[in-house]
Image (cartoon, grey):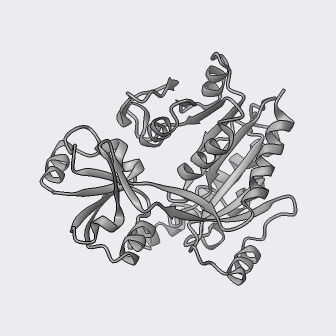
Amino acid sequence: MNLLRKLLLPFVPFYYLVTWLRNIMYDLGLKKSSTYNFPVIAVGNLSVGGTGKSPMVEYLISLLKDEFVIATLSRGYKRETKGFQIVEPSCTAKQVGDEPLQFKKKFKDIIVSVDEDRQNGISNLRSLSPCPEVIILDDAYQHRKVKAGFYILLTAYYNLYCDDIVLPTGNLRESRKGANRADVIIVTKCPSNISFEERERITKKLKIQSNQDLFFTTINYQKNIVNASGVKTLDSLQDINFTLVTGIANPKPLLDFYMSLGLQFNHINFPDHHNFTNEEMEKLNNLEFIITTEKDYVRLNTGILEGKLWYQPMEVMFVENSGIFDCKISDYIKKDIP
């Protein structure tokens, strides 16, 4: 924790009080939430950034897209536009945000949309033809003007919400009690070899409610990199000194993965969702071989770095009980589809 955040500790009670009052007003019905008679799944977290929301949204899309008409709705963080917009593969990250664009490029047959007003976004989505049967809300856990039918709360293994405090000194957007709204809690980015005893220890720390289910996931990095020209295996990079460029909240798992393979690389780190300037792009263009994350790829792949830019595919993998999770999602949807 840096010195500035420590100095802001006296403001923590004020932030806690403001977010607590807001939640109480929604809980008591003094502030109104929109409810829906069709399946709405919200994926989010209590902390700022870095819990793996995008891979979880992609997991849900893969799980449901062959059986239902799916739509995703995101705010479109750091986009330069406003209001409701349908995301097309030809859009840019500046127009719609990097994560929604990533969803659309990967899943071209589903509806991907952005709107900072989730109520308005849902209304617009439901007016489409075909009308989406299931709407997945990306990063909407604190967006309480909308009451989803099913809440998935993510917390990263290395930064559990139960070990944190609220902003501005900590990283929580609201108090730990906000976890009580979740139907499912998922500890993300676990070591692939996490033991049963470690999972039991975390389960006790989180103190989940009797009506909640807890799951553990890890990141599965594929053994190849991809760009528009094709695929390269990571084994083929053993004799190449490449540059890894990241603009995500926590690149450490990817760094650890590459180091475990014995790869030689330099790392250039930017802030999460960083919009690259022309000067930065020119400097990157002087490099010979660049690997980045899939989310960063949609911001960096503007044509300037063509031929030298690759991305590392990854996906969520459940440590155990993936079938139970899948059934819970399916049961909820089938119950709520009109």
Residue 111 vertical position relative to residue 326 in the rendered view, above or below: above
In the rendering, at what x and y percent does residue 115 appear? 54, 30
For the C terminus, the quadrant is top right
Res 182 → quadrant: bottom right
**Residue visible at 44% across and 54% down in the picture:** 313
In the foreground, 231 or 308: 231
In the rendering, at what x and y percent does residue 329 appear? 76, 47
**Direction from residue 247 to residue 83 in the image, left or right:** right
**Residue visible at 22% across and 71% down in the picture:** 239
In the foreground, 152 or 176: 152
In the rendering, at what x and y percent does residue 302 appear? 26, 38
**Residue visible at 28% across and 66% down in the picture:** 237
**Direction from residue 111 to residue 258 in the image, left or right:** left
Residue 291 vertical position relative to residue 113 in the rendered view, above or below: below
In the rendering, at what x and y percent does residue 142 appear? 64, 46
Residue 267 in sight here: yes
For the N terminus, the quadrant is bottom left
